Image: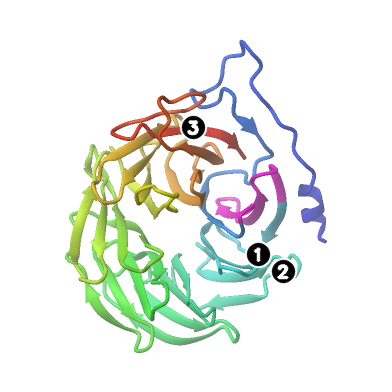
């Protein structure tokens, strides 16, 4: 185990605001404070296992963190500019990280501190990474207009395709399929066939830049998010992938850029839900089918909230620019919001509150 890993494996002290002590922000009171995962803004967070998350940020580190115990497990150092995206291959200990240094690195939690593979070839920041369902191929997308398909074992780029003004913002692989979906600064969404590495569908262009996308576990739906300001744009949109370009509903309510959108795990007897986070310092939960906002959590002072990672049916991790990673608890059907940073909005009385920060 490397010196850096040993250094960070020490369990951090828990902290609760003493009774009567004024919290720094409205969401600080009664929040568990763990050792920070990063020093600086956090750009991305995802899940490695039910207990472990992986994150990346401006400090150039890729961090594995036990969010249940409040303990850092590993800090990978290898990028020389900030990390833009992290991705884990389900059921494995593989981690992929993209960076402004134009590379993607592959790590294995069980194989020490060094990266085990490097994917080089982009000319600008890499903003999108996705792994094929069989774990053999890696898709990358960049602001250089290139979409690339790599063989993971050899790190060889097998296909490259350049589309003018296709400044890629995010990439998703559709589960159990050969299809890859990507969003772009040119306001469009494209679907690629990974066998021919050709665009098979282009969705109607939105009014604003498309910042992020996610695909439902059954592969039937896509949700995308838009930038914007003053409430213009700022929405998330649900699309039916079985009818490419078919818009189902829009989720409107954020006041600034909606930076992230994700499908939430469905709890027993519950309805399908979508979570969004925004530069307006808020996280919103929506009924997927009716577009009713079920709850809103405002984290004043946290800065842009740029990435979300659902951990189970009642927990959500949120990456922020100014206040680290937030562990948000979701209480379905709670009669009223209680505790720090809680908020509700719309039908359903969903209680949302921050329970820990790291």
**Lower position in the chain sequence, tag 2 or tag 1:** 1
Query: Vertical placement of 250 versus 133: above or below?
Result: above
Label 1 and label 3: CA atoms lie apart by: 35 Å
Q: Would you identify the image quadrant in which residue 177 lies?
A: bottom left
Q: Residue visible at 42% across and 76% down?
A: 176
Label 3 and label 2: CA atoms lie apart by: 37 Å
What percent of the width, then of the height, locates residue 41?
53, 45
Which callout, 2 or 1, points to the residue nearer the camera?
2
**Lower position in the chain sequence, tag 1 or tag 3:** 1
Q: Which residue is mark 3?
A: 353
**Lower position in the chain sequence, tag 3 or tag 2:** 2
Instruction: Report helix, strand or loop for mark 2.
Output: loop
Q: Which residue is mark 2?
A: 114
Instruction: Report helix, strand or loop for mark 1.
Output: loop
Query: Vertical placement of 341 versus 97: above or below?
Result: above
Q: Quadrant of the image for the N terminus? A: bottom right
What percent of the width, then of the height, locates residue 185?
29, 61
- Reply yes or no: does residue 63 show up in magenta: yes
Q: Would you identify the image quadrant in which residue 169 lies?
A: bottom left
Residues rendered magenta in the picture: 50-72
Instruction: Report helix, strand or loop for mark 3.
Output: strand
- Reply yes or no: does residue 291 show up in magenta: no
Is residue 121 in sight in this rendering? no
CB contact under 8 Å: marks 2 and 1: yes
Query: Vertical placement of 203 versus 344: above or below?
Result: below
Which callout, 1 or 3, points to the residue nearer the camera?
3
CB contact under 8 Å: marks 1 and 3: no
How would you classify the magenta stretch by its main secondary structure? strand
């Amino acid at each position: 185990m490397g010196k850096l890993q040993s250094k960070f494996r020490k369990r951090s002290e828990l902290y609760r605001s003493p009774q009567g002590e004024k919290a720094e922000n409205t969401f600080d009171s009664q929040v568990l404070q763990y050792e920070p995962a990063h020093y600086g803004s956090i750009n991305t967070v995802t899940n490695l296992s039910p207990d472990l998350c992986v994150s990346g940020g401006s400090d150039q580190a890729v961090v594995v963190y036990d969010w249940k115990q409040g303990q850092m497990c590993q800090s990978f150092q290898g990028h020389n500019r900030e990390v833009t995206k992290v991705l884990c291959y389900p059921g494995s200990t593989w981690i992929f990280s993209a960076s402004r240094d134009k590379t993607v690195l592959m790590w294995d939690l069980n194989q020490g501190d060094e990266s085990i593979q490097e994917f080089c070839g982009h000319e600008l920041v890499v903003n999108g990474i996705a792994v094929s369902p069989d774990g053999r191929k890696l898709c990358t997308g960049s602001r250089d207009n290139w979409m690339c398909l790599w063989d993971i074992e050899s790190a060889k780029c097998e296909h490259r395709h350049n589309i003018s003004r296709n400044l890629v913002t995010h990439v998703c692989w559709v589960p159990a399929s050969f299809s890859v979906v990507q969003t772009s600064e040119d306001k469009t969404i494209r679907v690629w066939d990974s066998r021919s590495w050709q665009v098979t569908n282009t969705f109607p262009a939105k009014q604003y830049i498309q910042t992020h996308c996610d695909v439902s576990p059954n592969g039937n739906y896509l949700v995308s998010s838009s930038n914007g300001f003053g409430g213009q744009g700022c929405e998330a949109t649900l699309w039916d992938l079985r009818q490419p370009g078919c818009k189902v509903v829009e989720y409107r309510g954020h006041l600034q850029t909606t930076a992230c959108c994700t499908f939430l795990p469905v709890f027993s007897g519950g309805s399908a839900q979508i979570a969004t986070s925004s530069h307006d310092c808020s996280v919103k939960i929506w009924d997927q089918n009716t577009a009713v906002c079920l709850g809103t959590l405002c984290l004043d002072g946290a800065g842009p909230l740029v990435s979300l990672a659902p951990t189970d049916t009642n927990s959500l991790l949120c990456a922020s620019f100014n206040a680290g990673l937030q562990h948000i608890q979701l209480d379905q059907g709670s009669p009223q919001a209680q505790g720090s940073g809680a908020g509700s909005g719309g039908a359903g009385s969903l209680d949302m509150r921050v329970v820990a920060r790291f």
